[in-house]
């Protein structure tokens, strides 16, 4: 079955959901590409006609020059006049008219930028909507799973009357399929664009999506969703169906990775190593650029104290990996990933907890000592 039919069936299946999501308009974008193909064929025809007209004009010019030299020896230069043997032939005059009407590129100027602008602007808008919808839905799902305080007590009480675990499993499965299907649709439509135009603009546009953090498969919320699925499967509840069939995690590998299998037999590896301490992530945070760090390492890079948190970091501070500025205030605390690593690396996690507690106490003491000295004036 072609992917277009598969994607259409997926959309029809999800239309019955209570909360509507944004989807890639795959069929409509293919229609835009059909108009792009028509414009490309017109451009090829016009280019051939322009090349033939230029070649004929060159031959006509050489013939006129030979006639002029043969009949005008000893005379001054003469102008080509209408009706004389020295004027361009009718084919050359028509060719000149074609170039005047169609422009330098051989196609009407109104057709040149329209296809690309319509295609890429539409795709950018839809990709942004999809990422925003996916992030909001995953955030809401994880908020229900990891709650604290009074909310956690209410959630425990609610389990007596309603099976929330079952609904969370179904929601998790839907979000995994939603992310993978839309990501594959974007990749295929860009590949089709490059095939139609014989260019690499689609590949460059995909790089642009990554630089603007609109690449769905690189979203930190997808990593959190994978950790959520693995945590549910590790809960040991036999009444719940398996949810983590597309996610695998190997914390003993070098480096430790989480692997996601896509429906088209491709796989993605997410490195769970902190780029600063070069150890397995502990209390991980994802910066808005998508890179993962331990909280203590990220605070050190942002020149803030651990107990202050990344929210107070200066907007001019840059990511240690990609050097993008302003990535700390909107950092995402990866609670599900931290819970997964806590379960699978118990000894390592306890060791890091003790070390971070000592460092926090040390920084807190130094901070308040400086504040006291500032207040009393010495």
Image (cartoon, rainbow, N blue to C red):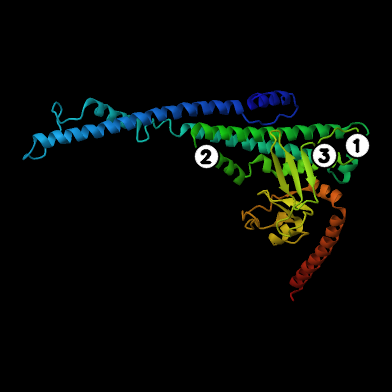
In the rendered image, which residue does mark 1 sit on? 237
> In the picture shown, does residue 95 fall above or below 151?
above
Residue 352 x, y percent position in the rendering: 83, 59
Q: Looking at the image, which residue sits at the far bottom? A: 378
Asked if 91 appears above or below 146 in the picture, the reply is above
Say whether disc 1 or disc 3 marks the residue closer to the N-terminus: 3
Q: CA distance from mark 2 to mark 1?
A: 49 Å
Counting residues from the N terminus, which is met first, the one under dot 2 or under dot 1?
2
Local crowd size for mark 1, using a 10 Å CA cut-off: few (<14), some (14–19), many (≥20)? few
Residue 15, located in which quarter of the rendered image?
Answer: top right
**Disc on the earlier residue, 3 or 2:** 3
Question: At numbered mark 2, what does the secondary structure look like: helix, strand or loop?
Answer: loop
Q: Residue 124 at x, y = what percent? A: 58, 37
According to the picture, the residue beneath numbered tag 3 turns out to be: 144
Residue at disc 1, secondary structure: loop
In the image, 56 versus 148, the foreground residue is 56
Badge 2 is on which residue? 200
- Where in the figure is residue 51, as x and y percent of width and height? 33, 32
Asked whether the viewer can see residue 78, the reply is no
Q: Residues within 10 Å of mark 3 (few under 14, many from 20)?
A: some
Task: Please state if 154 lies on the left or on the right of 107 as rendered.
Answer: right
User: How many numbered markers are drawn?
Assistant: 3
Question: Is the C-beta separation of discs 2 and 1 under 8 Å?
Answer: no
Quadrant assignment for the N terminus:
top right
């Amino acid at each position: 079955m072609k992917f277009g039919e598969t994607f259409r069936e997926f959309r029809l299946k999800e239309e019955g959901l209570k909360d509507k999501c944004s989807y890639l308009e795959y069929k409509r974008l293919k229609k835009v590409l059909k108009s792009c193909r028509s414009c490309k064929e017109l451009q090829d025809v016009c280019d051939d006609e322009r090349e033939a007209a230029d070649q004929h004009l060159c031959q006509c010019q050489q013939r006129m020059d030979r006639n002029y030299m043969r009949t005008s020896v000893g005379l001054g230069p003469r102008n080509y006049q209408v009706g004389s043997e020295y004027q361009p032939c009718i084919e050359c005059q028509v060719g000149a008219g074609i170039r005047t009407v169609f422009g330098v590129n051989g196609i009407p100027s109104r057709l040149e930028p329209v296809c690309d602008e319509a295609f890429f602007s539409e795709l950018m808008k839809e990709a942004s909507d999809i990422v925003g919808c996916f992030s909001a839905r995953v955030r809401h799902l994880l908020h229900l799973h990891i709650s604290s305080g009074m909310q956690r007590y209410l959630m425990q009480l609610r389990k007596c009357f309603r099976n929330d675990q079952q609904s969370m499993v179904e929601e998790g499965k839907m979000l995994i399929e939603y992310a993978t299907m839309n990501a594959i649709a974007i990749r295929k439509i860009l590949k089709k664009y490059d095939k139609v135009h014989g260019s690499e603009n689609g590949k460059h546009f995909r790089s642009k999506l990554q630089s603007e953090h609109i690449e769905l498969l690189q979203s930190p919320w997808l990593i959190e969703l994978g950790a959520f699925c693995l945590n549910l499967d590790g809960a040991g509840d036999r009444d719940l169906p398996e949810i983590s069939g597309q996610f695998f995690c190997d914390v003993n590998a070098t480096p430790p990775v989480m692997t996601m299998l896509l429906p088209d037999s491709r796989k993605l590896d997410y490195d769970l190593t902190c780029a600063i301490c070069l150890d397995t992530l502990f209390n991980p945070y994802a910066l808005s650029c998508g890179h993962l760090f331990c909280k203590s390492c990220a605070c050190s890079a942002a020149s803030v104290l651990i107990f202050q948190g990344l929210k107070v970091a200066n907007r001019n501070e840059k990511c240690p990996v990609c050097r993008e500025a302003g990535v700390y205030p909107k950092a995402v605390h990866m609670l599900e990933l931290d819970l997964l690593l806590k379960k699978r690396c118990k000894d390592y996690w306890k060791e890091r907890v003790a070390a971070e507690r000592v460092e926090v106490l040390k920084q807190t003491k130094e901070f308040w000592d400086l504040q006291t000295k500032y207040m009393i004036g010495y």
